Image: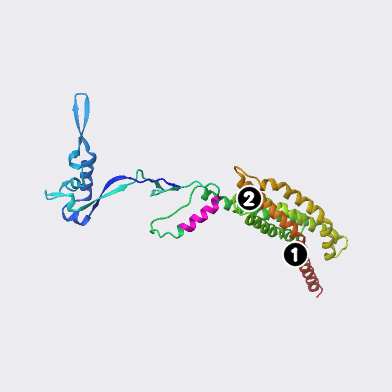
């Protein structure tokens, strides 16, 4: 890591006591103008020799500004035409100043730059935030995180919206498929099961949640929804043929188990080389593959239990609602 502001050059700081300065008949404008002339010179006057013009630079001789005592003896003429020396109303301190001034939004800024190798940016950023929170800083000092950390936060926000949008569009697709607003919720219950498996896979592999991991979760929504759709759709077909709900669910789970296992295992096995890959850029590939492997595995094992249970609960609720509505109509 490095700071954009390095150790500065030696300099002299003049701390003016304004009350003393005013009592001696001087103004800050006069003092500033005289010091400017003493050190940098004044070229308001010109000397013209025929067609040539020369600047007349009036400033203090180098011999008279070699030490702090020389600077403290710089003289000023007040409004009463009396001579006043600088040390009578100002303190002169040796200091170091920055080699350059950095500003952001018109505010003085210092930037700490760091390159992270071998560790996720999010993990390192979290550790830095925790360390910064323990620092007691003045109220006028603020700390902002830029670069990859800021881009990652913005990426998380946009991907979070994309994640919710994908769930919503899957729900709309299920509504059109089943012609019902209730049964699509059964399919959506397979998503939390997959997300738990994805997070567990990241935790076991000691991988941090990254932008590519969230992208994997968005992909996961469509993949795990497929297994639930197979069960729900086949259960609805069996119910139309006259099977009871419990019997239809048992038959759907038994008959659809083979295609669910085959499709899920083929994707999981295909993702293993990516999850185990090494080398440049392997971090984001590993996270994406591990999310898919963990999510699909947990979905394969638990969807066959969760989806039938949720389906049965929804079916009982719908049946009771219809019976209550029928009784009210008869009365």
Q: Is any atom of residue 78 visible in this view?
A: no
SS type, badge 2: helix
Write down the residue under mark 2. 287
204 sits to left or right of 99: right
Q: Nearer the viewer, residue 331 or 323?
A: 323
Question: The C terminus is located in which quarter?
Answer: bottom right
How packed mark 2 is, by other alpha carbons closer than 10 Å (few <14, some 14-19, many 20 or more), is many
Residue 196 vertical placement versus 320 (above, below):
above
Q: Give the residue drawn at x 70%, y 52%.
A: 293
Q: Is any atom of residue 87 visible in this view?
A: yes
SS type, badge 1: helix
Residue 98 vertical placement versus 131 (above, below):
above
Q: Nearer the viewer, residue 96 or 181?
A: 96
Percent position (x, y) of residue 23? Answer: 17, 56
Q: Nearer the viewer, residue 122 or 107?
A: 122
The chosen color scheme is rainbow
Magenta stretch, main secondary structure, is helix
Residue sitting at the far bottom:
331
Percent position (x, y) of residue 143? Answer: 44, 54
Write down the residue under mark 1. 310
Start-end of magenta stretch = 119-131
Percent position (x, y) of residue 74? Answer: 17, 46
Residue sitting at the far top:
50
Q: Give the residue drawn at x 14%, y 50%.
A: 84
Residue 53 vertical placement versus 64 (above, below):
above
Res 248 quadrant in image: bottom right
Residue 123 counted in the magenta span: yes
């Amino acid at each position: 890591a490095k700071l954009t502001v390095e150790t500065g050059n030696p300099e002299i700081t003049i701390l003016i006591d304004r009350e003393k300065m005013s009592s001696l008949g001087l103004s800050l404008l006069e003092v500033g103008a005289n010091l400017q002339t003493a050190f940098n010179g004044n070229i308001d006057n010109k000397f013209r020799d025929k067609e040539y013009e020369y600047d007349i630079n009036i400033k203090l001789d180098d011999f008279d500004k070699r030490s702090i005592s020389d600077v403290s003896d710089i003289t000023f003429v007040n409004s009463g035409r009396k001579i006043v020396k600088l040390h009578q109303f100002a303190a002169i301190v040796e200091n170091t100043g920055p080699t350059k001034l950095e500003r952001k939004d018109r505010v003085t800024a210092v930037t700490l730059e760091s390159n992270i190798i071998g560790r996720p940016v999010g993990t390192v950023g979290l550790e830095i935030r925790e360390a910064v929170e323990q620092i007691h800083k003045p109220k006028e000092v603020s700390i902002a995180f830029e670069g990859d950390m800021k881009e990652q936060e913005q990426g998380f926000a946009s991907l979070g919206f994309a994640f919710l949008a994908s769930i919503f569009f899957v729900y709309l697709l299920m509504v059109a498929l089943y012609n019902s607003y209730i049964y699509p919720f059964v399919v959506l219950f397979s998503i939390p099961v997959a997300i738990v498996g994805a997070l567990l896979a990241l935790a076991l592999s000691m991988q941090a949640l990254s932008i590519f991991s969230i992208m994997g979760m968005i992909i996961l929504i469509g993949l795990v929804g497929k297994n639930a759709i197979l069960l729900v759709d086949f259960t609805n077909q069996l119910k139309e043929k006259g099977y009871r709900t419990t019997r239809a669910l048992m038959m759907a789970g038994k008959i659809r188990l083979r295609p669910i296992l085959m499709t899920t295992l083929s994707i999981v096995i295909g993702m293993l080389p990516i999850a185990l890959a090494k080398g440049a850029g392997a971090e984001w590939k590993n996270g994406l593959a591990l999310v898919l492997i963990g999510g699909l595995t947990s979905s394969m094992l638990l969807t066959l239990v969760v989806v039938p249970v949720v389906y049965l609960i929804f079916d009982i609720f719908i049946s009771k609602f219809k019976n209550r509505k029928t009784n009210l109509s008869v009365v």
